[in-house]
Image (cartoon, coloured by chain):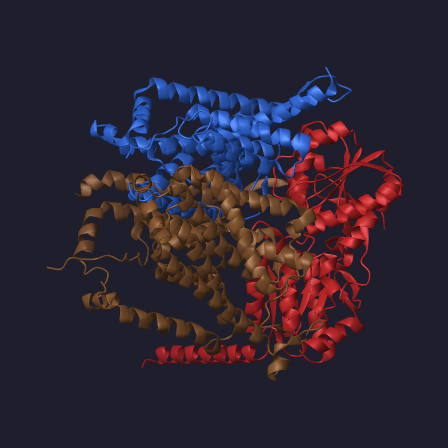
Chain colours: A blue, B brown, C red
Amino acid sequence: MPESLYYFLQQLLNGLTVGSTYALIAIGYTMVYGIIGMINFAHGEIYMIGSYIAFIVIAALAMFGIESVPLLIFAAFAISMLVTSAYGYSIERVAYRPLRGGNRLIPLISAIGMSIFLQNLVRIAQGSRDIAMPTLVTGGIDIGPQDAFHASLSYMQMIIFAVTLISMVLLTLFISRSRMGRACRACAEDLKMTNLLGINTNGIIALTFVIGAALAAIAGVLLGMYYGVINPYIGFMAGLKAFTAAVLGGIGSIPGAVLGGLLLGVTEAITAGYFSTEYKDVVSFGLLILILLFRPSGILGRPEVEKV
Amino acid sequence: MIRTNLKPAVISAVVVVVLSGLLMGVRLNQDGTNLTLVGAGPDVYWKIAIAAAFIFFYNLFRDHLAALWKAMPGMPKTPVQLIEASKKPILRRLFWCFLIALAILWPFISNRGGTDLATLVLIYVMLGLGLNIVVGLAGLLDLGYVGFYAVGAYGYALLAMYFDVGFWTGLISAGCLAALFGFLLGFPVLRLRGDYLAIVTLGFGEIIRILLNNMTWLTNGPNGIGGIPKPTLFGLEFSRKASEGMQTFHEFVGIDYSSEHRVMFLYLLALLLVLITLFVINRLLRMPIGRAWEALREDEIACRALGINPTSVKLGAFTIGASFAGFAGCFFAARQGFISPESFTFIESAIILAIVVLGGMGSQIGIILAAIIMTILPELAREFNEYRMLLFGLMMVLMMIWRPQGLLPMNRPHLELRT
Amino acid sequence: MKMAHKKALSQIITAAALVGFSGYSLAADTIKIALAGPVTGPVAQYGDMQFIGAKMAIEQINQAGGVNGSQLEGVVFDDACDPKQAVAVANRIVNDDIRFVVGHLCSSSTQPASDIYEDEGILMVTAASTSPEITERGYKLLFRTIGLDSLQGPTAGKYIAEQIKPKKVAVIHDKQQYGEGIATAVRDVLTEAGIDVPLFEGVTAGDKDFSALIAKLRQANVDFVYYGGYHPELGLILRQSSEQGLDVRFMGPEGVGNTDISAIAGEASEGLLVTLPKAFDEDPKNADLVEAFKAKNEDPSGPFVFPAYAAVQVIADGIKLAGSADTEAVAEALRSNSFDTPTGTLAFDEKGDLKDFNFVVYEWHADASKTALTE
């Protein structure tokens, strides 16, 4: 196979890796928006906190002499998801619930304020420097000829794909098969009606935030291990990209968020690989604007009719 | 009652510990090339313990506390006479005259730092008033306002760099350029509903910043553009030595050079721009287009039913709002003498939006007050450097919870039936 | 009153009086030096280096008796590496009547701030701003204790051309003044020496994912890469290169030469070439100073720690030589004398730059140590 094909394959794989993480974070945005119509600006910061907790857990266990990589990773996932869920729940309770049902701008400002607050909280607690962790999972497989250009797929990338896939499947099963999942869907359809029917909508909304936060934590752990470097400012850009992905795929739709995330990741990688690394963000946002111009509800979104 | 509250109280205290224990209780430490953990120190542990205890007792005695709060006299309400008085047009006019007089006298009664700070406040007032048109009056959620600000600033800087344009020409051009961008942006986004509009404008603001950062051949990229000429008064420069063919202000008037003069001049210039802005917006509010903006915010469908074309109204709001940002940007560039893309991030948009919402959407006096507070607070809190932004974020959240209608909500001109 | 109480009371009064009087005398006789740089923001770690160096110098000079009988006092100002805040800080410094500034850190902050300082007669010594443009404007009160970008590039380029002699070199930079300036200089030297530079590209500072760039480098089949910029990006590039099978030698300027790069890149930082000023913290002359830093749990190996120390020191020595704290006199003294500092013997030229500043090529190791390859 010609070298250019391997090059394309490499960029594709890179794009899908990053895209999966966008997808994980985007789901949080889309679920919250789907149910209460609010853009949770602080979601990116939740992802950042997830990364930090992962680093703390791994550092702690390493200090106690635990060397087993699978154990470290498992512990990082478990504790990180627990803590970020607590954050998701608390933020909803404290900053968003009192503001529900009014002008759309008010909870938005509150969310922006929350985002700034969390970012600086972590900065004060952990310092603004980059914190680096040695690579835990090394090695990978090579696809293609050894002596010429070949695509390489690292084990870490495979883990990212696998975990994302499993998370998606579990989430979809939950939403479509379980009772609470049905309640979630009902809330997304019509919140007031669902409330009238006796479902505890406050609890469902809280659950949505918790699920979103847990997924963001997964992304945080994965990306923390993949790049190995974190600082308090990674939440903003990641949140923005994930948000773009959610809108791209149709905000309110979970498969849309996944599709949007992957699409965004691949677009960025292709732009960086074939044109210029400098403008890949411009292309991402440009793509968003284009999609919104021609299909305002996103790729998989349902065009909403505004009722009088 | 205490027993029923016991469980939620315990749970919330545990949540507080979970939230802060790991994230703040230990500190990641880069020890050479190793990653280790150190305890954050006893004072942090105490803070966490106190916070948990506080939440525990607050939840435990929540009902008691709520009853206590109601029983208290409450926030002092403005006396009825004051409210009645504020409605009289003569008093309002007097109030504004007083305010403007104070503003003009300010540089003469305050020191250099105070005047400089006041100039910054005025820039934010201008930005707040401009965004107010888009968000407060027309109800369009714009999260990328900083993009127009950047266009104005860079427009002037580039014109000055390449075409040797002076400040006043630059001001007009910057405003027109920003208005053009507003028009171009407004076009495609008109059809989008509220939140989508927000996202697109956010993306637009980011695109502008990234383009400015990357188009090094035009904008010098992250290194910014320096040497931007300062404004002149009818050709008189405010510097120690005049450049070629120009004369300096202090030579013309015959006084000693003091760099304070330039600071005062910049302040008065900013004040002039702000007064013009206020005047223009007040006029617009009373014209059909101003009414159309407010109608659009209240109910777009009803607007359309009444025969108002929402497209052109939105476009008007965007364009005019953008032009004010352009003016502010041009002035900002002239005052700083140096601009770089770092000054035009999303946080700026957030701050300006916060000013509009804090002031009470649509209310101009509220926005002035909010701009003053938002600019002065970080300066006062410089001693708490570390905690400055933290408190800022917290304040945004708290303000929204406690007083979402803003500090001085807008008083719409209306008629009341009196029986 | 009981005897014990009376005694205690008189002790308290005496103590209070002493504190009061000493405070008064301190206030009357201090020379304030503003320390301007990022306390918050993404490059706060570099600001840190500047602050600990300067503060240590102030502490040691004060312990040795101060300057002409006066004590030094450092006042920290945060500009978050933002030009807008830098201007605000400059105005504040003018307002607070502080006549000496060590800072700012980022060239983009130093530049607009220096306009204000020069206008107001405030002396500024920067320990970290390396952009040549800053001293090109004929300012009389502006000095540097750090080398210029225009010196490092040719040193690196020459080394690559003469010692490494690679077939193809890729030159990458972070599009900022510092990184791009050095990278351009390196590329020019290499092209003149006849070496093929098939790739000259910029990455965005703050980026995390360089896989696209690395794939490009692999495809271009280069055997050497020069990176102009700072350690956060190069560290990630090194790390991801080794993970993705890019097996080439890297070289970078002093902005990458610190322990963090080994923390980020681990094994991949072994064999990295770095141009650094002669390592101040490894100079045996400075052993005591290094011990003093370590005793306070501070890291003396950052590239701006010692230059900041030197900056405070030259200000202090300049005041001593000039006999007064008048900034113009001190500036004259700085220009006409040489000073013995932990960064070597410093002398300033007309523009305020250091007269000579030697860069040495080091080989970096995975445990953050380094060995000198040239003199």
**How many tags in the picture?**
0
Where is C327 relative to A126, above or below?
Answer: below
The residue drawn where x is 78% and y is 61% is: C344
Q: Is residue C367 left or right of residue A162?
A: right
Using the image as rendered, state which of residue B9 and residue B230 is in the foreground: B230
The reply, left or right, for residue B404 in relation to residue B350 is left
Q: Is residue C30 left or right of residue B118?
A: right
Which residue appears at 43% of the width and 49% of the height? Answer: B316
Q: Residue B287 or A114: which is nearer the viewer?
A: B287
Q: Residue furthest left?
A: B419
- Front-most of B301 and B226? B301
Residue C289 seen by the camera:
no
Looking at the figure, which quarter contains the C terminus of chain B?
A: bottom left
Residue at 48% of width from left, 61% of height from top? B123
Q: Position of residue A245 (x, y in %)?
A: 49, 31
Q: Position of residue B271 (x, y in %)?
A: 47, 68
Give residue C358's quadrant in the image: bottom right
Q: Assign the N terminus of chain B to one quadrant of the image.
A: top left
Q: Is residue C321 above or below residue B334?
A: below
Position of residue A42 relative to residue B392, above or below, is: above
Furthest residue in direction bottom, as rendered:
B254
Asked if one can make out residue B323 in the rendered structure from this viewpoint, the answer is yes
Q: Name the residue furthest top.
A: A1
Q: Position of residue B78 (x, y in %)?
A: 23, 64
- Return the residue nearer the eye: A155 or A69: A155
- Which image quadrant for residue B17? top left
Residue C103 x %, y %:
64, 62
